[in-house]
């Protein structure tokens, strides 16, 4: 994200009137680091900053103090997924919004566990709570529906939303063992921190819950999604399916039924004519059923390594442009701080 | 469009704070009809309005007078395609913007022949020039790039963007003659007013030119697109291709080369594994190559009859929400007039 922000610095300024300084970074490795005058990001790459933290960082031990010292206008939240309650991302986002900063997350946990709370908190604070990177990397799914498909009714969707299992299934079809296939997905850097989240369908279920919660307006937690992972699929069954022109895929489905949503994540055998059957590697696909477009499909093939960071960058542009404190039609007097 | 507007009237008001009256209609059949107090739209269906036009409509003979009498805040422009110069849509849109109305069109002619002029005119007038329905019915392609993919670089695209030829090719593969296949496309109501625009690739070329002009920022007129239609394809060749697992499709391609765009529309034989090969009927597909998403695909399968009208409705919501004369966060004091 930092690389991408700096790579697009000139375009952000020239095309969108947005300038920024990075005034705080917090990570397990670096601890709480903040300097309202701006951090030299080249230092962060070499981790030199952790050896000699800015004076303003002394004694920082929690997110509220860190945000206050950083004087942040925008928080980028990128902790890893917690399926049970969306913490600590949920508290980080709350702290940012209460402290007057926009909150941008790539984490779907807070979306499924606290969407309405955080949305309303952001609204009351006049700030943005944005999470485009939570599903399908940075492909603008949430903003498409929010900004560009008004008074449209989403009846349901189906798709393949977890890359790790998709890579594993492709590898097993080709003859690899489950363990070797998982190792490959991890080597590619797409597996979640806890790979069982992927394999047992949790990651996909949380994505389905996030989409149902936000796009269908039906609060849905992952435990309410019927869920079956790929642990029990045998390589023999997969190769046999492939030989008969069909493929196993971990398929997500959701359908509006009255005021509720019926959703499930499970392995399915798909005919080769199904567009979901052709998806390989780290690609994702989602097919929306709406009242105007009966079958609108978005496919993200082989996303680049920066696709998730890009979603956060796009959210940053949205937040800055919406901010009454900034005038994005001119160069701002005071640079945005992130 | 009128049916859709009235069908969503309550949602437009409750969710977006938008109210409207239809204050003018002009068509070959009805002539120039305007009433700033609002027209009863049920009359329009039965054409009774043409038998007894509102008093305010007397002596109207041109678009400027008609817009002035209608006191329109928004013009919906839906004349048919003129490949050579984008008229009369271009003049209609100019008149609307100069008269203080937002201009929304489903016509791609003015986009390829006058995009920068109309965009700048709209900007100076503080109004919107919107054309989401010009390509892929109402699927939000233009607004996706404009609103949701900031600082992204589009390197090129390929796709199938003309429904009439896609229907004809599918029918001919199945054994129908060219004439019978064309008659079927016309019966489905998807063929352009002049079907040769479809068959000779003009409709597809204008769409490619519109996408290159707006999304790639390179002004492109249809005569600069290398273009070959489907007139010379034989049914035998098509069936032979299908038997070998391949399909003829009228494929659009555009690629940025330096500061220019190289684009063409031509029949291609595609392998069955190409997602474009699987497209049937009135469906459309576009595959974008960008610097972040190497292959982002949007497929619109079997659009409903109201998909194009929906694109204009979505543009209407965009225009109304952008309008400093309206306060869409509350119910407006004065209803929007369209």
Image (spheres, coloured by chain):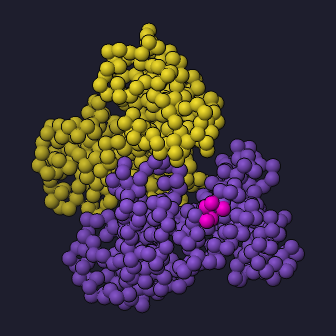
Chain colours: A yellow, B purple
Q: Is residue B110 above or below residue A263?
A: below
**Rendering coords of residue B107 (x, y %):** 58, 71
Residue A108 is covered by the magenta coloring: no
Residue under the point 80% across and 68% down = B68
Q: Establish if A25 lies above or below B291.
A: above
Q: Is residue A316 left or right of residue B42?
A: left
* Picture quadrant of residue B86: bottom right
Which region of the structure is painted magenta? B117-121
Q: Which residue is rendered at x = 47% and y = 24% of the image?
A: A38
Q: Main secondary structure of the magenta part?
A: helix
The x, y position of residue B276, in whole percent, is 34, 67
In this image, B204 relative to B7: left or right?
left
Which residue is at 25% across, 70% downward? B271
Residue A227 x %, y %: 34, 40
Q: Nearer the viewer, residue B112 or A38?
A: A38
A292 or B164: nearer the viewer: B164
Q: Nearer the viewer, residue A5 or B258?
A: B258
Q: Position of residue B224 (x, y in %)?
A: 44, 75
Is residue A317 positioned above or below B171 on the image? above
Q: Give the residue at the far top of this rendering.
A: A59
| Left or right: A337 as drawn, with respect to B30 | left
Residue B223 visible somewhere in the drawing: yes
Q: Is residue B159 visible?
A: no
Residue that appears at 40% across and 26% down: A40
Please say whether residue B120 is one of the residues in the magenta stretch.
yes
Left or right: where B107 falls relative to A134: right
């Amino acid at each position: 994200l930092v690389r991408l922000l700096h790579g697009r610095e000139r375009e952000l300024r020239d095309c969108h009137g947005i300038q920024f300084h990075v005034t705080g970074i917090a990570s397990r490795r670096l601890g709480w680091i903040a300097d309202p005058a701006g951090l030299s990001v080249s230092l962060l790459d070499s981790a030199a900053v952790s050896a000699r933290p800015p004076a303003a960082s002394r004694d920082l031990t929690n997110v509220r103090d860190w945000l206050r010292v950083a004087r942040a206008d925008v928080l980028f939240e990128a902790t890893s997924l917690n399926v049970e309650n969306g913490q600590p991302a949920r508290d980080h986002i709350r702290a940012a919004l209460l402290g007057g900063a926009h909150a941008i997350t790539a984490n779907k946990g807070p979306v499924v566990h606290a969407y309405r709370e955080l949305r309303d908190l952001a609204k009351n604070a006049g700030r943005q709570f944005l999470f485009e990177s939570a599903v399908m990397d940075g492909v603008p799914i949430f903003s498409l529906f929010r900004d560009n498909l008004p008074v449209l009714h989403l009846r349901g969707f189906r798709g393949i939303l977890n890359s790790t299992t998709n890579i594993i299934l492709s590898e097993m079809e080709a003859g690899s063992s489950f363990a070797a296939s998982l190792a490959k997905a991890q080597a590619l850097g797409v597996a979640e921190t806890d790979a069982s989240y992927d394999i047992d369908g949790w990651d996909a279920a949380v994505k389905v819950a996030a989409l149902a919660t936000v796009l269908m307006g039906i609060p849905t937690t992952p435990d309410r999604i019927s869920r079956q992972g790929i642990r029990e699929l045998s390589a023999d069954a997969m190769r046999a399916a492939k030989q008969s022109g069909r493929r196993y895929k971990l398929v997500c489905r959701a359908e509006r039924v009255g005021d509720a949503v019926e959703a499930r994540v499970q392995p399915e055998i798909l005919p080769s004519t199904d567009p979901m059957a052709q998806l390989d590697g780290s690609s994702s696909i989602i097919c929306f059923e709406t009242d105007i477009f009966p079958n609108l499909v978005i496919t993200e093939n082989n996303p680049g390594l920066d696709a998730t960071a890009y979603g956060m960058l796009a959210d940053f542009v949205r937040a800055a442009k919406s901010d009454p404190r900034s005038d994005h039609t001119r160069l701002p007097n005071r640079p945005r701080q992130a």
